[in-house]
Amino acid sequence: MTWSTREIAELSGTTVKTVRYYHEIGLLDEPDREPNGYNKSYEVHHLTRLLQIKRLTGLGLSLAQVAELGTAADGHHSVFREIDAELEATVQRIQSIRRELATLSQHGATPDVPTTFHDVAQPLRDNDRALLTIYAQLFSEESMAALRQLLEANPHEALDEAFRDLPADADEATRQALAERMAPFVGANGSLTLEPKAATAHQAEAARHAVGQALRALYNSAQLDVLKRAHELSSG
């Protein structure tokens, strides 16, 4: 028994266009034609091949990988291991997305800060929230976990508020006094060191540059001056 192109496409759960494309790229052998020289006669081995292609592409293989395998998978186990590793990574990514969605579904959660910070972000202002989002991109998970613990403990609430409320036209005495109060908690002597995710020195430098740019964009001139003074005092 033989089948036409339309019939074998229906049997294999694909389309006539797809069958013809498989012929074009050499993935499926051309069948013999009927005596009229026009209609094609597909046989069982064509149907088997189409079903194999459908199965393999359904498992995640590309058409190029299917072509590489040919009609047998012997000696090509690495291809399946590679696909399995990709699927494992996809599963982990999906699980991570679901955890984040579950957190964002909770009352009070907000999408403008990293998900793990939603319950400690209430006191933060818009510029703090933006900086936190940038930090999450640039710094390690361990650093962000330490930062979250620090925000949760909130040991310097009054000092944080004084810095956030500092106007751009703050006078010299106000800036110096605030810098002296902040000095023990910043720089090398501070209680928290953020480690970049960077794998290379170039990436680390790019991360530091990005943080500098963010600080200049998000905080006023007096706040930046106080930060500079506090770092100089802490390292002196």
Image (spheres, rainbow, N blue to C red):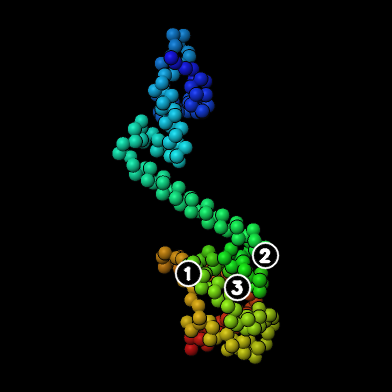
Tell me, yes or no, if residue 208 can be seen here. no
Is 81 on the left or on the right of 143, as rendered? Answer: left
Mark sitting earlier along the chain (3/2)? 2
In three-dimensional space, the C-alpha distance between marks 1 and 3, rounded to whole angstroms, equals: 25 Å
Q: Which mark is residue 142?
A: 1
- The residue lying at 59 percent from left, 88 percent from top is 181
Q: Amino acid at mark 2?
A: Gly
Of helix, strand and loop, which one carries label 1?
Answer: helix
Of the residues tagged 3 and 2, which is closer to the observer?
2
Whether the residues at callouts 2 and 1 have beta carbons within 8 Å, the answer is: no
Question: Which part of the image, by quadrant, shows the N terminus?
Answer: top left
Query: What residue type is disc 1 on?
Result: Glu
Task: Report the disc number at residue 108.
Answer: 2
Camera-nearest residue between 6 and 128? 6
Residue 92 visible to an observer of this rendering? yes
Residue type, numbered disc 3: Arg
Residue 60 lies in quadrant: top left
Query: Which residue sits at x=49%, y=71%?
Result: 143
Q: Residue at x 44, y 50 (%)?
A: 88
Judging from the image, what secondary structure is the residue with disc 2 in?
loop
Q: Residue at x 50, y 82 (%)?
A: 190
**Helix, strand, or loop for circle 3?**
helix
Q: Residues within 10 Å of mark 3 (few under 14, many from 20)?
A: few
Provide residue 220's location: percent of width, then percent of height.
65, 76
- The disc placed on residue 216 is 3
- Residue 213 lies, in percent from the top left, at 57, 70
Q: Nearer the viewer, mark 2 or mark 1?
A: 2
In the picture shown, does residue 213 fall above or below 104? below
| Marks 3 & 2, CB-CB < 8 Å contact | no
The answer to which quarter of the image holds residue 115 is: bottom right
- Distance from disc 3 to disc 2, alpha carbons, whole Å, reads 30 Å
Relative image position of residue 131 (x, y in whole percent): 59, 69
